[in-house]
Image (cartoon, coloured by chain):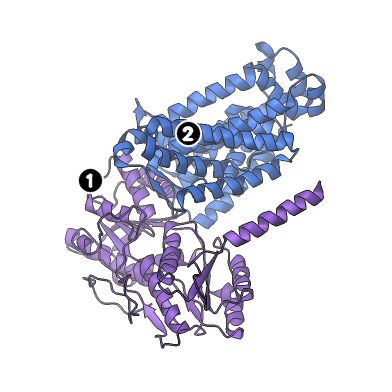
Chain colours: A blue, B purple
């Protein structure tokens, strides 16, 4: 952890960054490659362009949340409310599109995600709530709000908007589905912000050693509100893609997404103690989880076994990283 | 500071507790208090059965209903029943989460000497007053028969490849819908092969996710059997996205929502095994009212289901039906308690007796 915070207070552009790419962040890509090879061997339909894009598209919804989650985890926090924010944004977007059109729906959705995240951040900063507790409260409150707003029932996007709205989740840019394109764009943005801006440095600094960061003049409050807002915003993007794919806003959407996103981020190398991690890892971690799901479905593995295997692989993936530190 | 927060919490709790009282407004004397322990409220079907119960109760000015929901947790349902008994309910309506863990609650209700009316999901054993519901095992068998009949039209004999998209694992309706289906295929139609049977979370997105993966692995699919309309609609989205929505795959939903009926009308969903939450809730509450007013009711009121297809759609579809509305065959305005639920359209296949 010291290596990251030391880095943070020095020059953070250029060659010094390359020197801090450690094995554990490369390790997850090796693991991913191995999994792809195993998949190609055990299933003949696995290694096709159609299936690989299928996996990427499914993974995109969790990967985008994992991106925001990585910011939060690196800062030393955790966000358990992301799945519930997905539900809330999902119903808000569907309901708003039906009344005010697609543009308004998207704007409101993204805004609501950011607001929910900012509230989480405010709770952590100004009420000094531990992130686990604040976002746990958020988890129940935001989903409750989703149920209240929708009356517990799915909100179908009206015929006249459904076609255009579905393009976000169902359209293609060449061979690549739009959700995959959106995912790569957001990841590129996230990478730049995390590695090449001052606030990105502060995120690492706070996670590495909050006292040292404060004494160095880092604005702790701003940075913490920032990471939770990013997490909320990412959840909103994911919700929009999800809702656009089924053209229905569901208050039960996103259940367990927080655990999948945390698993993805941790498999990718983010340390729950803070100060360590990267966006690339979050992407690789998400891909690993969804390749597993894809193989399980295609090989007709019963769901009880799926849960056991998934858990074992998560533990193995994290163990391998700890062994190498 | 802590005293203030404690006071604030107390006031909030009281306000929330007062706000929970759902059901009929009590103008005049409220003579009977009915408790409804729902299994959960996280699916429109569950919301619909609760609305139906409340709607029917509104016809009786001397009956007030209070509801709880257990988030599909058997332990929470036990606490819910204890809470309701403590409030002094005169009758308990319940959708059990699971039969076995509910036994202590049955004992408690019997000890309190109040009638027990299970709806949709029954308790284990005979210690109830009146049960209103449909057998999920029967639903599984009915769809198996339907798919077999359709495949026989196509291949001159009942054979083909079927994919099953289940609900949440461990959930009683899921287990029964699966069991009935598998059992019937194994008994009567060995030529039909279940090439994949995967769980979803009963949502449209979940159905879509699983179907997408299965489409990659299976190039030949004759039929898709789902445990819920939402799952079927999700599977349809996946088929559309993959360009495999060509009408050659029989798609079966479960329930009978407005969205499902519309899908059948558009030629996307092929069939829907009906199970109306409105029938179950309305008839259940009607039976409860009769019991409270001292009238005799049958021990069991079985609801009949049927296969809704494009051919009999008109008998089920109502004008201005919302996507989240459900079909119903019961007459909402009447007060007569039927001896059995009607299917409206007699099943075209072999008449099978109860579970």
Residue B218 at what x, y percent from top left?
34, 47
The local secondary structure at tag 1 comes to loop
Quadrant in which residue B291 is drawn: bottom left
**B40 lies above or below A118:** below
The local secondary structure at tag 2 comes to helix
- Circles 2 and 1, Cβ within 8 Å, touching? The answer is no
For the C terminus of chain A, the image quarter is top right
Q: Residue at x 29, y 51 (%)?
A: B221
**For this view, does B30 lie left or right of residue A276?**
left
The answer as to whether the residues below labels 2 and 1 share one chain is no
Question: What is the crowding at mark 2: few (fewer than 14 residues within 10 Å), some, or many (at least 20)?
Answer: some
For the N terminus of chain A, the image quarter is top right
**B223 lies above or below A48:** below
Q: Residue at x 33, y 72 (%)?
A: B187
Q: Chain of mark 2?
A: A
Residue A257 at what x, y percent from top left?
55, 44
Label 2, label 1: how far apart the Cα atoms are: 37 Å
Q: Which mark is residue A108?
A: 2
Q: Which residue is mark 1?
A: B246
Q: Is residue A64 visible?
A: no
Q: Residue at x 57, y 45 (%)?
A: A142
**For this view, does B228 lie left or right of residue B6?**
left
Q: Is residue A39 visible?
A: yes
Q: Chain of mark 1?
A: B
Q: Nearer the viewer, residue A72 or A101?
A: A101
Residue B214 at what x, y percent from top left?
38, 47
Between tags 2 and 1, which lies in front?
2
Outermost residue, front direction? B28
Q: Nearer the viewer, residue B300 or B151?
A: B300
Residue A105 at what x, y percent from top left?
42, 34
């Amino acid at each position: 952890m010291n290596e990251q915070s030391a880095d943070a207070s020095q020059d953070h552009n250029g060659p010094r960054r390359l020197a801090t790419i450690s094995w554990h962040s490369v390790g997850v890509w090796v693991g991913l490659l191995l999994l792809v090879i195993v998949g190609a061997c055990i299933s003949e339909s696995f290694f096709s362009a159609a299936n690989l894009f299928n996996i990427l598209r499914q993974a995109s919804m969790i990967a985008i949340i994992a991106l925001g989650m990585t910011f939060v985890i690196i800062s030393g926090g955790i966000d358990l409310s992301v799945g519930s924010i997905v539900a809330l944004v999902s119903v808000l977007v569907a309901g708003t599109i039906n009344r005010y059109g697609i543009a308004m729906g998207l704007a409101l959705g993204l805004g609501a995600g950011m607001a929910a995240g900012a509230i989480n951040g405010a709770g952590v900063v100004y009420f000094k709530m531990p992130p686990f507790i604040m976002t746990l409260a958020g988890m129940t409150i935001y989903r409750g709000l989703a149920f209240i707003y929708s009356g517990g029932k799915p909100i179908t996007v009206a015929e006249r908007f459904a076609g255009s709205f579905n393009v976000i989740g169902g359209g293609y840019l060449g061979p690549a589905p739009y959700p995959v394109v959106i995912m790569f764009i957001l990841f590129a943005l996230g990478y730049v912000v995390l590695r090449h801006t001052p606030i990105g440095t502060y995120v690492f600094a706070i996670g590495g050693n909050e006292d040292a960061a404060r004494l160095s003049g880092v604005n702790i409050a701003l940075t913490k509100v920032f990471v939770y807002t990013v997490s909320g915003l990412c959840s909103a993007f994911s919700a929009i893609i999800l809702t656009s794919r089924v053209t229905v806003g569901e208050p039960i959407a996103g259940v367990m997404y927080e655990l999948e996103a945390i698993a993805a981020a941790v498999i990718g190398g983010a340390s729950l103690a803070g100060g360590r991690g990267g966006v690339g890892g979050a992407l690789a971690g998400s891909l690993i989880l969804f390749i597993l799901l894809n193989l399980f479905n295609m090989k007709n593995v019963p769901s009880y076994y799926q849960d056991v295997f998934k858990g074992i692989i998560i533990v193995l993936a994290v163990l391998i990283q700890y062994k190498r530190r | 500071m802590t005293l203030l927060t404690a006071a604030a919490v107390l006031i909030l709790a009281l306000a929330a507790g007062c706000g929970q009282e759902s059901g009929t407004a009590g103008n005049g004397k409220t003579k009977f208090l009915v408790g409804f322990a729902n299994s959960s409220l996280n699916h429109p079907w569950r919301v619909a059965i609760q609305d139906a119960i409340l709607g029917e109760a509104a016809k009786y000015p001397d009956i007030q209903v209070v509801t709880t929901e257990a988030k599909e947790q058997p332990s929470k349902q036990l606490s819910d029943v204890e809470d309701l008994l403590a409030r002094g309910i005169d009758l308990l309506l319940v959708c059990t989460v699971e039969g076995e863990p509910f036994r202590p609650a049955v004992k408690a209700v019997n000890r309190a000497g109040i009638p027990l009316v299970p709806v949709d999901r029954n308790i284990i054993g005979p210690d109830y007053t009146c049960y209103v519901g449909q057998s999920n095992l029967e639903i599984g068998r009915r769809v198996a028969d339907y798919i077999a009949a359709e495949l026989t039209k196509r291949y001159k004999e009942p054979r083909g490849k079927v994919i099953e998209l289940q609900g949440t694992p461990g959930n009683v309706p899921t287990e029964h819908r699966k069991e009935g289906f598998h059992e019937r295929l194994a008994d009567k139609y060995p030529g039909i092969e279940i090439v994949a049977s995967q769980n979803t979370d009963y949502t449209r997105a979940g159905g879509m996710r699983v179907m997408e993966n299965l489409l990659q692995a299976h190039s030949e699919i004759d039929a898709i059997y789902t445990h819920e309309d939402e799952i079927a609609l999700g599977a349809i989205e996946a088929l559309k996205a993959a360009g495999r929505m060509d009408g050659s795959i029989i798609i079966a939903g479960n329930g009978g929502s407005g969205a499902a009926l519309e899908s059948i009308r558009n030629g996307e969903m092929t069939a829907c095994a009906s199970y109306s939450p409105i029938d179950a809730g309305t008839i259940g509450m009607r039976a409860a009212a009769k019991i409270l007013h001292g009238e005799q009711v049958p021990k069991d009121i079985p609801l009949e289901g049927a296969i809704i297809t494009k051919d009999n759609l008109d008998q089920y579809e109502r004008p201005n039906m919302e996507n989240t509305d459900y079909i119903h065959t019961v007459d909402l305005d009447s007060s007569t308690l039927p001896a059995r639920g009607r299917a409206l359209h007699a099943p075209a296949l072999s008449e099978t007796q109860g579970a």
